[in-house]
Image (cartoon, rainbow, N blue to C red):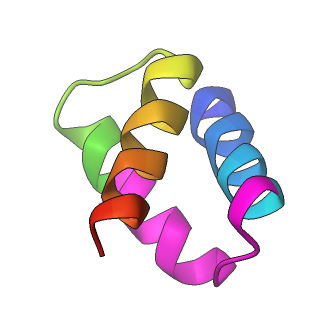
Amino acid sequence: MEAQKIAVDAVVALTDCDRDAVASFIRRLYLEGVRDPKRLTFRGLQALARA
């Protein structure tokens, strides 16, 4: 759970995106098995760059 919070805080701070949307995406990644906060943050930033 702490990994999710760290990743959401980092992505929101870096991109200024909607916190709920970022939290939803990070939660989905976490449930898929990604547990490392750095990996969650990186994948979140990659997804935002594609959108």
The quarter of the rendered structure image containing the N terminus is top right
Q: Quadrant of residue 4?
A: top right
Residue 40 place in picture, x, y as percent:
45, 33
35 relative position to 23: left or right: left
The quarter of the rendered structure image containing the C terminus is bottom left
Residue ID at (22%, 25%): 33
Residue ID at (54%, 36%): 41
Pick the front one: 49 or 38: 49
Residue 34 place in picture, x, y as percent:
30, 24
| Dominant secondary-structure state across the stretch colored magenta | helix
Total numbered labels placed on residues in the image: 0
35 relative position to 5: left or right: left
Q: Quadrant of residue 43?
A: top left
| Magenta-drawn segment | 14-27
- As drawn, 20 above or below 49: below
24 relative position to 9: left or right: left
Pick the front one: 14 or 28: 14
Membership of 26 in magenta stretch: yes
Residue ID at (76%, 74%): 16
- As drawn, 51 above or below 10: below
Membership of 22 in magenta stretch: yes
Q: Quadrant of residue 35?
A: top left
Return the residue found at the far left. Answer: 32
